[in-house]
Amino acid sequence: MNVLHINSYNIKGGAETVFNITRKNEKVVNYSGFVRTAGKEKPDINFLSWETDNPLIGAINYIYSIQNKNNLDKFLSANDIHIIHLHGFFSSISPSILSTIKHHKKEKILK
């Protein structure tokens, strides 16, 4: 079974600690998507944060990030994911990823 874990970051605080614990399940193949920070770990999906954009572009990307949507779409098209664990994404990644998840779920059901 392939599991994709998505969180805003992999290091910062308590939520990230729980996120990292869930990614240690040895009975499945774990993939991760998060905003890469100063840590050494490279995510399978490197999401971009709106927080580093200029204020206008940042506001748009906070609501709907086309780049994060496309990054997730490419990953899901190339990998057979059975479960997507959304731990936390609203603070940095944007809800745009939800439409991509819905699209890929429909495709899988129709196959």
Image (cartoon, grey):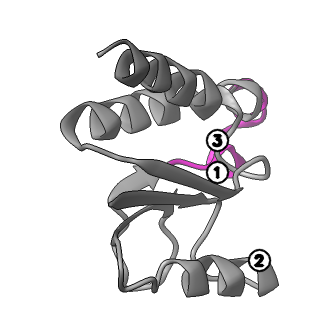
Q: What's the residue type where badge 2 is placed?
A: Ala
Q: Residue furthest left?
A: 78
Q: Tell me if label 1 and label 3 are in contact, CB under 8 Å.
A: yes
Nearer the observer, 15 or 94: 15
SS for dot 3: loop
Query: Could you tell me which residue is drawn at 79 percent across and 52 percent down?
Result: 91
SS for dot 1: helix
Q: Is residue 36 visible?
A: yes
Query: Could you tell me which residue is drawn at 78 percent across and 47 percent down?
Result: 90
User: Mark 3 vs mark 2: which is more N-terminal?
Assistant: 2
**Residue that numbered label 2 is attached to:** 15
Residue 55 falls inside the magenta stretch? yes
Locate residue 65, reporting x and y percent.
60, 28
Rendered-image quadrant of the N terminus: bottom left
**Residue that numbered label 3 is attached to:** 53
Q: Nearer the viewer, mark 3 or mark 2?
A: 2
Query: Could you tell me which residue is drawn at 61 percent across and 68 percent down?
Result: 9
Q: Is residue 66 visible?
A: no
Q: What's the residue type where badge 3 is placed?
A: Asp
Locate residue 109, reporting x and y percent.
42, 20
The secondary structure making up most of the magenta span is helix
Magenta stretch bounds: 48-60
Q: What's the residue type where badge 1 is placed?
A: Thr
SS for dot 2: helix
Give residue 52's mark: 1
Rendered-image quadrant of the C terminus: top left
Give residue 84's mark: none
Does residue 71 lie above or below 100 as drawn? below
> 26 left or right of 24?
left
Q: Tell me if label 1 and label 2 are in contact, CB under 8 Å.
A: no
Query: Which quadrant of the figure has residue 27?
Result: bottom left
